Amino acid sequence: MNTICTLNDLIAYLYNDTQLLKTVEIQKTIDNNEEVAELYQDMIAISKVLDQSLITPSRCISESIMHYARLTAPF
Amino acid sequence: MCKQQISDNELVALFIKGDENALQKLIIRHEKKVYTSIYLLVKDSDLANDIFQDTFIKVINTLRNGNYNEEGKFLSWVLRIAHNLTIDYFRGQKRMPMAYDTEEYSIFDTLPLMDSNIEDRIINKQIQSQVRQLIEELPFDQKEVVIMRHYGNMSFKEIAEATNVSINTSLGRMRYAIINLRKIIQDNRLQLSAD
């Protein structure tokens, strides 16, 4: 990997957690380095897979939370 | 006409004023991320449901007591509560999940290998379930960072503060998690698509 773009940098970039100058540097590296570009594409894909893996709590739990909220309402 | 979604902080303000529908909207908006975050740590749906309920009861009480800092991100705050309750649970059980924060640790041996004759096309549900399993099998500290960063939208600085480590350590844990996930996905020939 290019020395100006570490994997940590790429991860921070993926999550919009980089400063402007670093962002430009990383984007340049992605544009010019096939290996980094491929890794970055995989990271985007992993991030999408993580989004697809969400699960929903039991419906009755959400209902019981709302029940608690109504029961303890100060008004 | 473009209908703009009401923000979390606006819903919080409405709830504090007594609008319970606002709370319901907040729960519906974030329940999947909060519940999944808990479930991935405790790996038990009944327990995850209990902690999810306790989390929102604490949210309700804190909001009503006026102790919520509006400047913060609502979801990150809720996930921090969920995370603390989960840690409390493990402490109560006197068994913290093992944390292997080294490059040498391999989770690959613990995962069932896919049959090479299996069909090329794997339906989405199977992939999702497998990915969940992959995340569940990550070392606790890596999983913690994935959950906080990916589902909680917390910055690495916030994660570092919440977990009492340096920013570099939290970035490093995320790095190992992504390397692990990428390798598992490639080894298991799961189709990655960035489209």
Image (cartoon, rainbow, N blue to C red):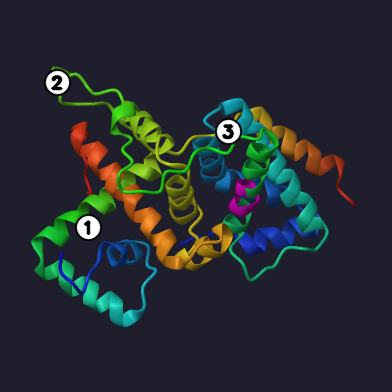
B159 with respect to B80 (left or right): left
Say whether residue B162 is visible.
yes
Per the rendering, the mark at residue B165 is none
Residue assigned mark 1: A40
Q: Quick check: is B143 in the magenta stretch? A: no
- The tag on residue A57 is 3
Residue drawn 23% across the image and 72% down it? A26
Quadrant containing the N terminus of chain B in the rendered view: bottom left
In the picture, measured across the screen, residue B91 lies left or right of residue B165, that is right
Separation of marks 1 and 2 at Cα, in angstroms: 27 Å
Check if mark 1's residue and mark 2's residue have beta carbons within 8 Å.
Answer: no
Measured from the top left, where is residue B93 in percent x and y?
67, 33
Task: Residue B85 in the image: state x and y as whole percent.
Answer: 67, 44
Which residue is identified by label 2? Answer: B116
What is the quadrant of residue B12 in the picture? bottom right
Residue at far right of view: A75
Badges 1 and 2, same chain: no
Give the chain letter at badge 2. Answer: B
In the rendered structure, the answer to whether residue A47 lies left or right of residue B87 reads left
- Image coordinates for residue A30, horizontal then vertical, percent: 17, 67
Mark 3 vs 1, N-terminal side: 1
Q: Amino acid at mark 1?
A: Tyr
Q: Mark 3 is on which residue type?
A: Pro
Q: CA distance from mark 3 to mark 1?
A: 32 Å
- Whether residue B80 is in magenta: the answer is yes
Pinpoint the chain carrying mark 3. Answer: A
- Mark 3 element type: loop
Q: Residue furthest bottom?
A: A21
First to last magenta residue range: B79-83
Binning the other alpha carbons within 10 Å of mark 1 as few (below 14), some (14 to 19) or many (20 upward) gives some
Which of pointers 3 and 1 indicates the residue nearer the eye? 1
Work out whether residue B58 or residue B195 is closer to the camera in this orientation and state it. Answer: B58
